[in-house]
Amino acid sequence: MEQLLAESSFGTLTPGSIIKGTVIEIRQNDVVVDIGGKSEGVVPANEFADITEVQIGDEIEVYLEKTEDRNGAPVISYDKAQQKKNWETIVAECKEGSILPGRVKAKVKGGLIVSMGIDAFLPASQIDVQPPKNLDQYIGQTYDFKVLKINLDRKNIVISRRELIEEQRNEKRRALLDEIKPGDIRRGIVKNLTDYGAFIDLDGLDGLLHITDMSWGRISHPKEVLSIGEEINVMIIEVDRDRERVSLGLKQCTSNPWESIEKKYPVGAKVHGKVVNLVQYGAFVEIEQGVEGLVHVTELSWTKRIAKPSDVLKIGQEVDAVILGINKEEQKISLGIRQLEPNPWDMVRHNYPVGARVHGKVRNLTTFGAFVELEEGIDGMVHVSDMSWTRRINHPGEMLKKGDEVEAIVLDVDVDQQRIALGMKQTQDDPWSDVDRKFHIGDIVSGKVTKITAFGAFIELEDAIDGLVHISQIGEDHVEKIKDVLKIGQEVSARVIKIDKDDRRIGLSIKAANYDSAQLQAEIRAYDRIRGNSGDRNNAPQTTSTASDDKGFGSLGDLLDKASF
């Protein structure tokens, strides 16, 4: 035993040293190496770059970590022996900034481990110009790397692939800047998207593709036509070599569809397209790539009152339309959808002649009248002045409500403005036309109080004609407040003391109901004298509208112009 120990190298084995050994067995997962110790050491097979190149009998160098483990076997490593020798070589021969090849070995927190004879650390930020999201794609790949830092104390190296790529890009960028010129077509990759455009990588040189140069049509964001990583052909529009900036164009690679737009789409032609945008005032319809037309909200329907296009259209919907107008210089096309159907207003004069009696349902009430639907999409308007011969209507709600069925007479038709004026009172005879035959000065009449004002009370007489009892004609005694003497709905008797057929007025007197002829004449004279001196026209409004109150369509039209018809 002493002789065997003397002949072996066991006594010279020192942990931390590199020793030589002989491969005596190759297994599936490890290699058995005789290092001259009491027992053989085992090296994991994955420490060899190619295990098939290892043969039994090969002499290799290994790193001795321990002379014995708990089983009495030495702990050795082929990989650490190589790294220790390589580290010494790198420290002696390599400097920061050197270029070395390496193979990506594994992924670790913050980056990758690269085998370059020794293990070096490649931070994720130094892998590529754009930090990659998936580091697994690099494992097993071989690249050239630039040495950034050598730490002798910690025996590690930090390397970069990005700096080499940037240097190569800089060389390519300088070469491209000297080479390219406006009008050239180049292949590029979409690198980044912004609200105002896209940056295109022209293999080392980034160019800006502005949103206005992406399409002959209108787009709201570059993502509508491009995506990051997409390869596209672009045209060089402008080159600024001093600032190293290049402006690019995508739409310039195709012909401008607006050049022959008037020949391709004559006014009146029917087109088919897709709704690409909806705004408050209309809808934009793409009729071909780069060519859009606007359908104004007023051109969507002949009869329907459309508040906003989104009520009847949606983005992506395919529609037919008619060309209404083209402005080639401003690249604008006006479209109409309602023109695909006949205009029902073209038949209004025929269907609703002036004087015709019509029926309809109250669709809406406004402060000045009521809109009556004669047929779908065709409305007529009854002004408050044309609702009653005898009553003064301040608001149509006093006589009508939505949904009421009404009968009216067509007073006027304006096809251009799409207006029909109707009258409800015209369906009956005007009771004021023969009022002087029904009522005479001095007649005793009876009626019901319908309205009380500060200056008098209105009494409803025969045929719904109102007469006015002035406050001075209520009683012999002075009346301070009429409501203290008369009530709405109260039946009263009075005497006719004034008839004005032209102004549609009847003056009544309650206190003169029991007067004799002489007293009555005196009261009438006194009444006329008081009215003349006090300007009673201003104090006592008409009981109904006068003939000049908007009978004509002109004044009605003025009111309609101010309304939302």
Image (spheres, helix red, strand yellow):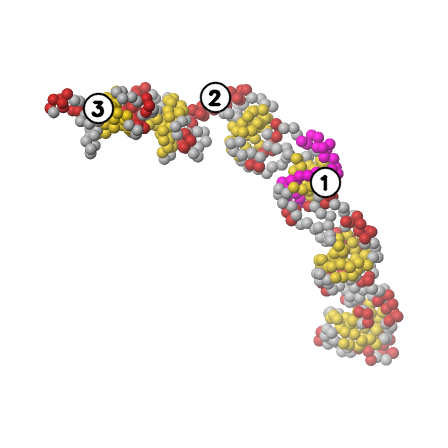
Q: Residue at point 16% right, 22% down?
A: 8
Instruction: Give the CA distance from mark 2 to mark 1.
Output: 56 Å
Q: Is residue 138 left or right of residue 300?
A: left
Instruction: Give the CA distance from mark 3 to mark 1.
Output: 94 Å
Question: Callout 3: 10 Å neighbours few (<14), some, many (20+)?
Answer: many
Question: Callout 1: 10 Å neighbours few (<14), some, many (20+)?
Answer: many
Residue on which disc 1 sits? 322
The amino acid type, in three-letter code, at marker 3 is Ile
Front disc: 2 or 1: 1
Which element carries disc 3, helix, strand or loop?
A: loop
Q: Earlier in the sequence, mark 2 or mark 3?
A: 3
Front disc: 3 or 1: 3
Residue on which disc 3 sits? 35
How far from the left and from the top, in percent, is residue 545?
80, 62
Residue on which disc 2 sits? 171
Magenta-tinted stretch:
257-285
Q: Quadrant of the N terminus?
A: top left
The answer to whether 366 is drawn above or below residue 322 in the figure is below
CB-based contact (under 8 Å), mark 2 and mark 3: no
Q: Residue at point 50% right, 23% down?
A: 173
Instruction: Give the CA distance from mark 2 to mark 3.
Output: 52 Å
How far from the left and from the top, in percent, is residue 456?
76, 71
Closest to the observer: 353 or 25?
Answer: 25
Closest to the observer: 198 or 9?
Answer: 9
